[in-house]
Amino acid sequence: RPPFLPADALLVPQGGACGYARPGVAQLAAHVHARACATPAVRTVALVCAGTGASALFLALELHRLAGAAANGGGCGGDGCGGMVPVLALPCAMHADALRAELAELHARSALESDRGSLPLWVFPPPANSARAVRFGALEPEALRAWRRARAAGMRIDLLYGAPALAQLLRAEVAGGGGSGSGGVRAIVEQLLAERSGGAREARPLELLWVHTGGLEGVPSQLARYVRAGLATPDELALAQAEADISARGPVYGTP
């Protein structure tokens, strides 16, 4: 019987969950790092929608490498200038605990020797917080509401990754009092940062940087499912199709 795959075949795991994905994230990391260096008055934390978590992991590793290289070279680097950017992964295809296990396995399998050590990113929500399972691709009214809210703010996100991730953040914000005091997403991130720095808290305000990881071309097909279920309108679908056609010809930028 002939082999299932030819000897020179390149096998890429689902979601690009292997070291081959890292070079493609390096340019993104450079952009995020440069932004953090240009805004030292705030502490930047990157929010990344995570399926297998490959993009989040390699972005975190590259940002860690860039901050270390800049600090050693005398340029921007380290927490003091905003050059060290933590990454917060938002589960979109599995439970948060399952994503943590997936990230740990991918980190052990794919990281370079210089990357060895503790995982330089977190999964939202933290283990101490309750989290329900994420059903990838399921029709979720909560995700659709988050997608509509993002659109109303001028922010274009997809329905498979961006909308469920944003729904998690909005749910945490409501549970924490809507950011009015000690609760909400920022309070959770502040606590994570404090734990990372041994309990110390900084006075600089947080900047939560949303990293867009899902294309807009797939929005119409997913939105059509919402229309058939009676959860979305044909007018919304027509507008999403027009935006997807524009996106296919070039990037679409929104106001985060």
Image (tube, rainbow, N blue to C red):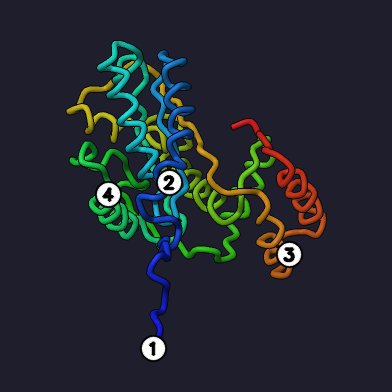
Earlier residue among tags 1 and 4: 1
Q: Secondary structure at mark 3?
A: helix
| Drawn side of residue 137 relative to residue 225, left or right | left
* Residue at the disc numbered 2: 55
Mark sitting earlier along the chain (2/4): 2
Name the residue type under label 3: Val
Q: Which mark is residue 1?
A: 1
Q: What numbered label is drawn on residue 227?
A: 3
Residue pointed to by mark 4: 107
Which is closer to the viewer, label 3 or label 2?
2
Residue 137 in the image, given as x and y percentages of width and height: 55, 64
Q: CA distance from mark 3 to mark 4?
A: 40 Å
Query: Left of 232 or right of it: where is 64?
Result: left
Using residue 219 as the reference point, say whether residue 7 is left or right of it: left
Q: Position of residue 228 (x, y in %)?
A: 73, 69
Q: Residue at x 42, y 62 (%)?
A: 10
Residues at circles 1 and 2 in contact by the CB criterion of under 8 Å: no
Q: CA distance from mark 1 to mark 3?
A: 48 Å
The quarter of the rendered structure image containing the C terminus is top right
Seen from the viewer's position, the closer of residues 232 and 117 is 117
Q: Seen from this angle, which residue lies furthest bottom? A: 1
Residue 220: image x %, image y %? Answer: 71, 57
